Image (cartoon, rainbow, N blue to C red):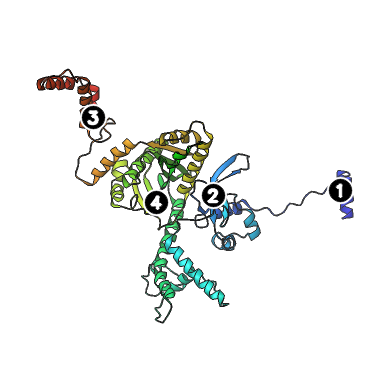
Amino acid sequence: MVKKAKNLRKICGYGSFPDAKIGNSIPNKVLEVVNNCYLSDDVSRVIPGMKDIKSFRKNGGERQRVSVRTFLNLSYIASTIDTFWEIKISLTKFREMRPPYCILAGGKGSHNVCVCKIHQNLRLRYAGIKQTLLKKHIQFDKSYRDSFNEMVCKESKSNCFLLNCQKCSLETVKETAANFLNILQRELPVVLKHDFIATAQSSFLNSLKATINEGEYIVTLDFSENYTFLIQDAIQSHHWNNSQATLHVYVAYFKQNNVLRNENFVVVSESLKHSAASVDLYNKKLIQYLKTKFSDSVIRNFFYFSDGAGSQYKNKFNLSSLLLHESEYGISAEWHFFATSHRKGACDGIGGCVKNAARIASLQKTNQITSPKDFYNWAVGYFKNISFDFCTNEEYKTHEKLYQSKDHDIERMNWPPLSPDMNPIEDVWSRMKLKMKERKGRMENLDELVNSIQEEWEAIPQKFLSNLV
């Protein structure tokens, strides 16, 4: 050490310090894999709440707001990363590399709701078994997934999880047992199927993102919870105001120069109906937007992914629209449904982010956001990476009538905007009543009434009539 100090003084002078030793830097591949692990939907999930947004500064100093993600067991994830992600990393370093918007369960905002009822009931039963055995000083570390492994073959296939395999090791044992264990025994096969379907669907989406070709789009879609308008300095009675806006969120994934990219699109609607007709209308707006933005490329195929809500997506009306998708838009389409109460994804995060920003803006602005149109105008100017479209009540009513006629042998015509209720006679009659009201007092008998109606009918401008046919 003395020799090194003297040599350093000769070379660098008095008061010099030795250079810091450069340790083993982590390869960029490992950094990318760890980050992808944290952001994987199998490891963490987006918290869709309006207030679940975290702000942080990027390396360039620019401030960014993103949706918070939560996950359960950091140690378990780190212990399995070398198996599933094929890298070696210590638990300490893995924890240090956690993104600032990924929080542990138990932290602020990590309260998880709307979970899968089937999985949660089984988890709670295993937790009850564990607590009972611990009171008797018996160690029990098994989870319901360990029971799944005992129910299927070692090299399991889809038939094993769907209980169609004749070689699986599951045996029926008859014995006297508590009702709790009987219920558990009945539910295990049910959850086995459900768990396999949920896992397979998630894996299919991930593999599809890696293998789609140019011209193919993966479209995830979901209704965000309706946004209730908020104003600063509101009077007490404003609390009972139910004015809201519907937000329907899309995230479209596509390949561009062999790089997976995404396009975010939100429809803001005055109509509060979450129906198959509204989904069909919003899908139409999305397709028009994509065809306009990517006019230099050909869109060949859509892969829709949504939850299984019966009133919106998983119904005969939506499947009927899917059959007509290629004839109406020139794009073939498939529709896939996530398992019940699974898959909180990018759509939930975007919906929460948009509503959070609108809430803050409403409390800061002097010009309040009090209607869906105000919300749309504000959002278009505020967000740079999210595109928006607007839908009026009249537009929805018109489309709903057209949509209802799809399943019947009815010739459909595109009525003009002057007839939002699909009844052009109503518009003519309203105009005639207004003109007759202006003539009130100048007609003394039936003949004069007939003549007046004839005169007003002939006086209707041709431009008005052309909008009714």
What's the amino acid at mark 1? Leu
Circle on res. 427:
3
- The mark lying in front, picked from 1 and 3, is 3
Q: Quadrant of residue 59?
A: top right
Badge 1 density bin: few <14, some 14–19, many ≥20, Cα 10 Å: some
Asked if residue 263 lies left or right of residue 319, the reply is right
Q: Tell me which label, 3 or 4, sits earlier in the chain.
A: 4
Which residue is pictured at 17% across the width and 17% down the height?
Answer: 442
Q: Secondary structure at mark 2?
A: loop
Between 209 and 38, the one nearer to me in the picture: 38
Per the model, the C-alpha gap separating discs 2 and 1 is 50 Å
Per the model, the C-alpha gap separating discs 1 and 4 is 66 Å
Query: Mark 1 near mark 3, Cβ–Cβ under 8 Å?
Result: no
Q: If the image is split into quadrants, where does the N terminus sit?
A: bottom right
Circle on res. 294:
none
Circle 4 residue: 306
- The mark lying in front, picked from 3 and 4, is 3
Q: Tell me which label, 1 or 4, sits earlier in the chain.
A: 1
- In the rendered image, residue 396, in percent from the top left (x then y), is placed at 32, 39
Circle 2 residue: 68
What's the amino acid at mark 4? Ser
Per the model, the C-alpha gap separating discs 4 and 2 is 21 Å
Which residue in the rendered view is the most extreme toward the front? 236
Q: If the image is split into quadrants, where does the C terminus sit?
A: top left
Asked if residue 87 lies left or right of residue 372, the reply is right
Question: Does 396 sit above or below residue 183?
Answer: above
**Viewer can see residue 219:** no
Q: Tell me which label, 1 or 3, sits earlier in the chain.
A: 1
Badge 3 density bin: few <14, some 14–19, many ≥20, Cα 10 Å: some
Q: Tell me which label, 2 or 1, sits earlier in the chain.
A: 1
Circle on res. 8:
1
